[in-house]
Amino acid sequence: MQRQLSDISVEMAKKLMGEVEFKDRIIGTKMSGAGGNNRVSMYSLQEAAEFLYSDSVDKLMQMGKSTIAQIDIQQLIKWIADVYEDQELANAITEDTATTDIYVEKIKIAKTLIEERINQCEEVLK
Amino acid sequence: MKGYMGKILRVNLTDRSISTIDTKQYEQWGGGHGMGSAIFWDLVKDKTISAFDSRNVVTLMTSPLVGTLAPSAASRTEVQGIGPQAYPYEWFTRSNVGGRFAPMLKYAGWDGIVVEGKADSPVWLDIRNQDVKIRDASSLWGMDTYETQQEIWSDVNNGLDYGSWNQVGFGRDGGRSTQRPAVIAIGQAGENLSRIACLIHDAGNAAGQGGFGGVFGSKNLKAISVIGTGNVEVADPNALMQARIWMKEVHGYNVDEPLRESPVDNFSLYGTITRRPGFGALLLEVTEPSRPKGCVGCYMNCRKKTSTAYGNEASCVEAIFYTSDGPENANKATDLLQKYGINVYGILQHGYLRDLYKMGVMGPGKQIHSELPFEQYGKIEFAEALTKAIAYREDIGADLAEGLPRAIEKWGRLEDIESGLITLPNWGYNDHYDPRLEVEWSYGSILGDRDINEHCLNWSVHWLPLVCNAIDQEPIISAEDMVKTIASKLVIFDDPMMLDYSAEGIYSEAKAKMIYWHRHYTRFWKQSVLYCDWAWPFFVNANVPDFKGFTPEGEPKFFNAVTGSNITFEEGMEIGRKIWNLDRAIWILQGRHRDQEKFAGYVYDVPTSAPYALTAFENGKWVYSDCLDRSLDRQKFEDWKTMYYKLEGWDPSSGWPKRSTLNELGLGNVADELASKGKLGSE
């Protein structure tokens, strides 16, 4: 069952939907069979959610036909907690990603939770 | 030897003369790259000229296997000449493109094309079998690559619908064809002399790296079109058929009864290993109806043809140029690159521009003034503005058209390359695989002229364990079996330590042997015989019990069947060594010295932070290591270079070949030329 995040304030929603400064960005690496590794700077939660893309396991097994979004999950959690000050989301990602050892599953979980928070923000800011 | 058409087309755009070169003069080089280098050596007397100098010569070469049934070897064109992309030196360089241009060229009766000089107005080359004309391209100038090709198709096919029988050639007996001519063209980026302009053929085929689009533009050459109705004479058609059947029956993927099944339903077991055809999208999920698309003679079909036509047939790195605005817009962005004729690797790190914007350095009224819509970064609108700016040299596109490193130098921000804020590890080329770790890639690149883009080992030693780590599954082959399997195919060495990517292994003598093997293999078998990078060599095969692919047995099998020669794999490697040394001599005449063969600072100074799987011998056993927290050690790399130069027979103090080495390879004339310039290595 999908985790329900608590409601948030308008002020918090604005913060979470905003872009951070250069010094506060988070960096990941998009890995692909043909293209190799590409550094990606992320300046918002939306960008992080977009970045946390993973092909299905099926596709990942087809060597050279897939992309992997490589990011340090702990760093991502810290970024959400420290820069966006969303401790609840950070805790949720910490707990839910601990349920699996599979990296691509972890980033899917993180992506889903971040997207849920973004949806909440969009509702609040309507 | 069979397989050759016997003639190379020579076109001088300055005086608009057309002549031929007898292929026999260059058969010793095999084809492709070897022939191109040898022709360049002979025709370009002053190797120090710039890429845009009219004396620069561009060769587009095929091989004996092109246009035959040789698998994944029938379609490639090797493009060479001095390229404007490398930084800070414009090295003699190469690029390679698939599709159907090369086979069509052979069906027209040519083994290659040599382009010299510069036209005084825009032209295109119209080849219809033996009829060759230099034609006015003023009406094509300004068109994108798709429009250009469509115009030429219509012109050559007399406006007939695709598939209609068309009389080929200007004479009465030219033959007939239902085919469109194969066209290789430049877009606006090439016309405007961008250093990151490429050559586009059909859709999804590009000679990207090197900047040959700009070189075509400098010569006022908009396109080359060819249509042929001949065929390639094969020495032993039965042997060729038997070889292909052998490959399928012994090494092929058994669709009905695969030897090894995936633990996951509904997938193709390690696609690249099994070579199961028809994947469609190479990198991105297919979100619309599509069908597989491949180059002539290929059984892998690594590309896709989509129902919307957006991003048509583009499935390599250009397909991940700009993926943040949904699949459809990702394909549109890919199309923009192809239409303008922009090399994706020249602008793949567009995120760096956004970093500068966020730093407050770039933008309206900023230190680097730009009115590009950075507030729309991530949306297709930004990709549209960026690619247009580069193609037409507008806004910061005027700087970016010079390539990122030159733009960065102009902006006074070279420290960004050193720090790794933007990762351009060697000769200003974009990062590909991690230069601190996957060193057959980075060492090969810095010892050469460009990002090598040779996936020979990459699939097996890196990508397979990386994917398995990501999904927490045991690789289908252990690290130890992996290195032993590959090593058994590294004729003449057979040393598993060549595959050791540990912190010590990357500086070892065995690694010098690995680079030695790899440089020679790719120069001959891959870039001269023109076996496709995606399919060859074939080291590890999941379809057979012992995992052994068909390298080194396959390479000479097809070559000999087509040509009627009887060379061994090792003899091919020796030709590769000869080509590698000839290229080295050209670079040396351009000014190369060992002191220049150094990476950007971050490669030495910034440790890796993401897990990166590679085979490594650690703590007495073979593992797939995550290679964390590693950077290259400057002194150890310099020591390794000394070891490698000695292995190649080059003077370790300069990196220049010795006369004895060149004489042994039959390159005495090259030694003489180097000696006359004071650039021969000391014995």
Image (spheres, coloured by chain):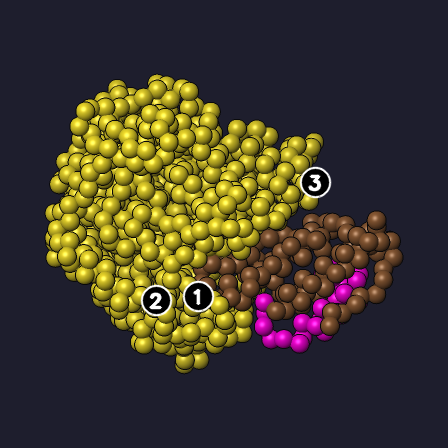
Chain colours: A brown, B yellow
- Under mark 1, the amino acid is Ser
For the point 76% across and 65% down, which residue is it? A89
Residue that badge 1 annotates: B268
Secondary structure of residue under mark 3: helix
Considering the numbered disc 2 on the image, is that residue within a helix, a strand or a loop? loop
Observer-nearest of B481 and B517: B481
Q: Is residue B508 above or below residue B152?
A: below
Inter-mark Cα distance, 2 to 1: 10 Å
Task: Answer left or right for B184 relative to B147.
Answer: left
Q: Nearer the viewer, mark 3 or mark 2?
A: 2
Q: Which residues are magenta?
A: A79-104
Crowding around mark 3 (Cα neighbors within 10 Å: few <14, some 14 to 19, many 20+) is few
Residue B158 percent across, percent down from the top left? 33, 25
Q: Which residue is mark 2?
A: B253
Q: Residue at x 70, y 31 (%)?
A: B365
Circles 2 and 1 in contact, beta carbons < 8 Å? yes
Residue B296 at x, y percent in the picture: 31, 47
Which amino acid, mark 3?
Answer: Glu
Residue holding disc 3: B375
Front label number (1 vs 3): 1
Q: Position of residue A115 (x, y in %)?
A: 72, 59
Subunit bearing disc 2: B
Q: Main secondary structure of the magenta part?
A: helix
